[in-house]
Image (cartoon, helix red, strand yellow):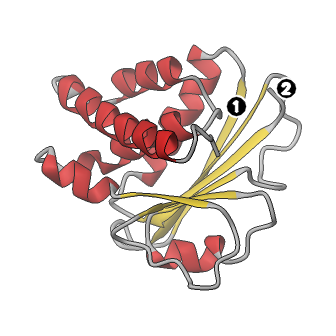
Amino acid sequence: MARRELRISGFGGQGVVLAGQILGQAVAVYDKQYATFSQSYGPEARGGACSAIVVADEQPIGYPYLTNPDVVVALSQDAYNRYGRTMNPGVKLIVDADLVKIDANHKHTYLAVPANRLARELGRVVVSNIVLLGFFAAVTDFVSTDALRQSVLASVPKGTGELNLKAFETGYQYGKKLTSQNGGAHV
């Protein structure tokens, strides 16, 4: 696979940074490729804007920042307003269906997953980022599903593995159902 770039953005408390770390670890440790991870967040611990960037490649990465993202994930309206409206053609957008309202004139391909709602239905909204990662594995070829699943298990607190695997599978199945309805197309 060639160089792949991803931005996950939302607000503090959604697990954006952890999702980026898990994804980068999946690429580097479990898929045995190169990956860089960077993060930014506002001065507020919770509720402020935050973003995680993952760059992955089979070759060493000379420039660890986004040049042309392949996928942008927006988990809040502010994140969509900042990153989802100004995307280059060909960039795929993933949004939380309940937290982001897409502009009527939005011209790019996008997929929506109700990650917060699905996590709430599992009894813990804090696993919405893991639901998102499961969905991401189902609808993209950015990283292998097995690598991402292993990385989730290696990264979550002891004693929460079962819940987090259930969250991952919930997102994964939601994504598989969505892609089968769209002719099996990945973004």
Q: Pick the quarter of the image with the N terminus.
A: top right
- In percent of the image, x 82 and y 55: which residue is there? 68
- Identify the residue at horizontal 29%, vertical 37% (top origin): 170
- Mark 1, secondary structure of its residue: strand
Image quadrant where residue 64 sits = top right
Q: Position of residue 73 (x, y in %)?
A: 55, 57
Q: Is residue 134 left or right of residue 80?
A: left
Q: Is residue 14 left or right of residue 38?
A: left
Classify 99 as above or below 164: below
Q: Is residue 179 left or right of residue 99?
A: right
Q: Residue furthest left?
A: 123
Q: Nearer the N terminus, badge 2 or badge 1?
A: 1
Q: Does residue 18 show up?
A: yes
Disc 1 residue type (three-letter): Ala
The residue pinned by badge 1 equals: 35
> Against 92, is 33 above or below?
above
User: Image quarter for residue 3?
Assistant: top right
Real-space CA distance between mark 2 and mark 1, rounded to the nearest whole angstrom: 8 Å
Q: Which residue is mark 2?
A: 60
Structural crowding at the residue carrying mark 1, measured as other residues with C-alpha within 10 Å and reported as few (<14), some (14–19) or many (≥20): many
* Residue kind at label 2, given as amino acid type: Pro
* Residue at point 65%, 62% (across, down): 109
13 shown above or below 126: below
Q: Which secondary structure, mark 2?
A: loop
What is the x, y in percent for residue 12? 39, 64
Residues 184 and 96: in front is: 184
x and y percentages locating residue 29 in the rendered image: 59, 17
- Nearer the observer, 38 or 104: 104
Q: Position of residue 139 (x, y in %)?
A: 54, 40
Q: Residue at x 86, y 44 (%)?
A: 63
Q: Which mark is residue 6?
A: none
In the image, farthest residue toward the bottom: 104
